[in-house]
Amino acid sequence: MSVPADPELRLAAACCRWPPSPARNAAVRAAAVGVDWDRFGRVVVRQRIAGLVDTGLKAAGVVVPEQVAVPLARQARRIVHTNLIAAGDTARLTARIAAAGYPVLAIKGVVLGALAYGSFGVKHSKDIDLLIRPEHIEPVLALLEADGYRIMQPAPDLTAEQRAVLPRYGKDVALLRSAHLQVELHWRLFTNPELLPMLGAGGATQTVMLGSNLSAPTLAPADLYSYLVLHGAIDGWSRMKSLADLHALVAGCDFDTLALWHDRAVVLGARAASEQALVMMRDLFALPLPPALAGTVGQSRRVRMLVAGAYRLMAAKDGTTEIDTWPYGRMLSLAMQPLLGRGARYQWQILRSVLYMQSDMYASKLPPALYPLFPMMRVPAWLGSRVTRGVRHLLGGGKSATIAGKAQ
């Protein structure tokens, strides 16, 4: 479970400590010694932590070379601008959907930023995540489409028959509107329906202020914690951003509250994810753990494997490489998922999500009535593409064959 030893990642982690403090400033100054600043700039972009890094370096009084400081400050300003737009849209959309009689929650995004940091100037956000009930998909989609939004994922221009089977094969759709952030409309929290099935838009909530006259509802505190640890774990904690946001949220808690949140995660079936997150926040951000947890979390082989895998993904190759461009990135992320749950139904849903890849399925010429047969097409096609790629690599040799294979 070794923590990434890369100097640039260590400095990034030091900047992500929260709240601001003399101890954080000292950690940042110590970690900044001998850093490759050009590489550090690439790490910041890859980990999506420009706001935290800009704040941390300035507070610590670290002199940053201009070729890194200027784009870093520009990225930090862009975060503020984006989050102000997101705050207005989040409050407007949740209010409009709720006024139409459909329960709705905002998850992650600016509501998490407001709870964790108390401002819009730190957390990187790129979309607005809304959670509704599955039975309200069509009327809420109609509301958003009347507002100028159009479905882009899993595929644009879905037919009525395809829209009718959306809840059977996925968890959300992505919609875009000109000059606005992407909206991801969720009807469940995870692709795997065995994860947190009892949490939904009709459950316990808290209201988050997004400005003097703006607010939005989100999951109740302990439920939000459970969702965030599982969301990060499913993604393999491949970016420091997500762990830093969770850390800022829990860093403001006393030991009793954090222990209660962990207990709630255990009840909801997220023990391994919670332990993984707690261990990583302790390692990377010096989070003090409640005495009741300090000696117990991270002891199981399951959690140790999850932590080790997450560090591999976060620091893929050199900490600047996107996992989608690392040949084993997505494979490792998928291989970690069986460790996060238990039971045959949970494991089957992991396999099912691979067999029924939504974007491929909706792009196929199969009528929706035949979607249950899609794996019969997908598996041979997948095997065929791998064989073709291998043959091209053998015949062509070298880099060109690999690139040709990736273009398929």
Image (cartoon, rainbow, N blue to C red):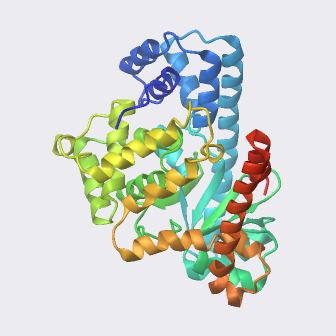
Residue 321: quadrant of the picture: top right
Query: Which residue is at the far bottom?
Result: 369
Question: Which of these two is toward me, 210 or 184?
Answer: 184
Vertical placement of residue 27 versus 377, above or below: above
Vertical placement of residue 259 versus 346, above or below: above
**Residue at (43, 17) in percent of width and height:** 25
**Residue 114: percent from left, percent from top:** 51, 44
**Residue 284: percent from left, percent from top:** 39, 32
**Residue at (42, 70) in percent of width and height:** 347
Quadrant (top left/top right/bottom left/bottom right) for the C terminus: bottom right
Counting labels gives 0
Quadrant (top left/top right/bottom left/bottom right) for the N terminus: top left
Say if residue 130 shows up in the picture: yes
Question: Which of these two is toward me, 79 or 292?
Answer: 292
**Residue at (28, 47) in percent of width and height:** 258
**Residue at (48, 38) in percent of width and height:** 117
**Residue 149: percent from left, percent from top:** 78, 64
Question: Which of these two is toward me, 394 or 264?
Answer: 394
Query: Which residue is at the far front?
Result: 395
Left or right, 373 with reference to 208: right
Residue 317: quadrant of the picture: top right
Left or right, 15 with reference to 78: left
**Residue 191: percent from left, percent from top:** 53, 68
Say if residue 101 shows up in the picture: no
Left or right, 148 with reference to 313: right
